Amino acid sequence: MGEMAGFQLGVIGALFLSVASSVSIVICNKALMSNLGFPFATTLTSWHLMVTFGTLHAAQRLKFFESKSIDMKTVMLFGILNGVSIGLLNLSLGFNSIGFYQMTKLAIIPFTVLLETLFLKKQFSQKIKFSLFLLVVGVGIASVTDLQLNFVGTTLSLLAIVTTCVGQILTNTIQKRLNVSSTQLLYQSAPFQAAILFVSGPVVDQFLTKQNVFAHKYSSIVLVFIILSCLIAVSVNFSTFLVIGKTSPVTYQVLGHLKTCLVLGFGYTLLHDPFTERNIIGILVAIFGMGLYSYFCAQENKKKQAGGDLSLGSQIKDKDGTPLLIQDKDSHEVKKLTKNSLV
């Protein structure tokens, strides 16, 4: 019970950190790009990842965590895939209307559910699917305003959906199957993500903005906001891997839409962005869907836990009925396995 309570506390902490840091960086980047005229989103993301790696490297040298070697090919492909997905999302925004870009982000949840069902044989109950449907509809009502289709934009959106879903599923799968922490995986993969975005970022940004990031005039206030954005990004990147590792890619996407609702609310409250009845209705529907998702997930986890307790009780009962000599042998084997696992 103590371990379960500690795990739940860790999940709550990870969720809170993810929401707080993501909303903070959105507000910071909006000020940087909209008010200060720094439109180079992809290049900025590469700087985020460089600072993240530098921070984690310093933390590792100070023994805050232990580095764990992961197969280089796996880490390299994983890092490149995540870097490509970020670039494709930015290109999707550049080639599509804002409304279609929001639809692209909304499509990530059902596509993730589809991939996990087909390839990982994960089962999603009808209640979970219904709550996710409500969430997606609510966010769609609140954020999607116009839909303008074009072939290039649609192709980029589809590629962005696929790479993002696969990347997030791998973030969860690698941590669990290779028994690495979120910090260890981020530390190993961040250099590859940063490298591909640092090379492609200026090209993508120049294509989208018709401006050169290296020829931009950097005022002191712009530099301050860039540094602030990079520092917040360390928390964003860390909490992203942490949430996906402790929960699931679908839960992370649900959390992402909560951030969208919060950003819309903050935009109206702090920045006086236009807000309509449609926004309010959409946010309320989305929050209701999130509440249902959280409730149904909690209920299913309780059932699984109760089933595990019953199974453990049955095993204990079977052990109590075995001869003493066999019990001692089993105890010796368990101790031996425990010792090996600790080594």
Image (tube, rainbow, N blue to C red):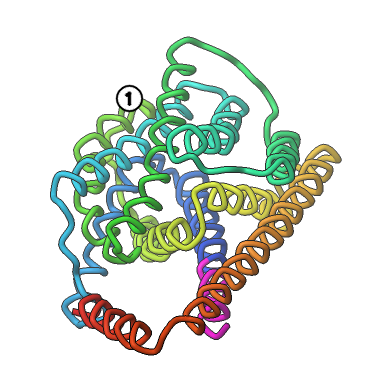
Residue 287 coordinates in the image, percent (x, y): 75, 52
Q: Which quadrant of the rendered structure holds the C terminus?
A: bottom left
Residue at (42%, 59%) from the top-left corner? 245
Provide residue 290's location: percent of width, then percent of height.
Answer: 71, 52
Magenta segment boundaries in residue numbering:
1-14
Picture quadrant of residue 237: bottom left
Considering the image in quadrants, where does the N terminus appear? bottom right
Q: Name the residue furthest top.
A: 151
Front residue (pair 107, 120): 120
Horizontally, residue 242 falls left or right of residue 314, namely: left
Q: In terms of image quadrants, where is residue 338?
A: bottom left
Which residue sits at x=58%, y=76%? 313
In the picture of the structure, the residue carrying the numbered disc 1 is 207
Is 12 within the magenta?
Answer: yes
263 vs 210, left or right, is: right
**What is the tally of numbered marks visible in this picture?**
1
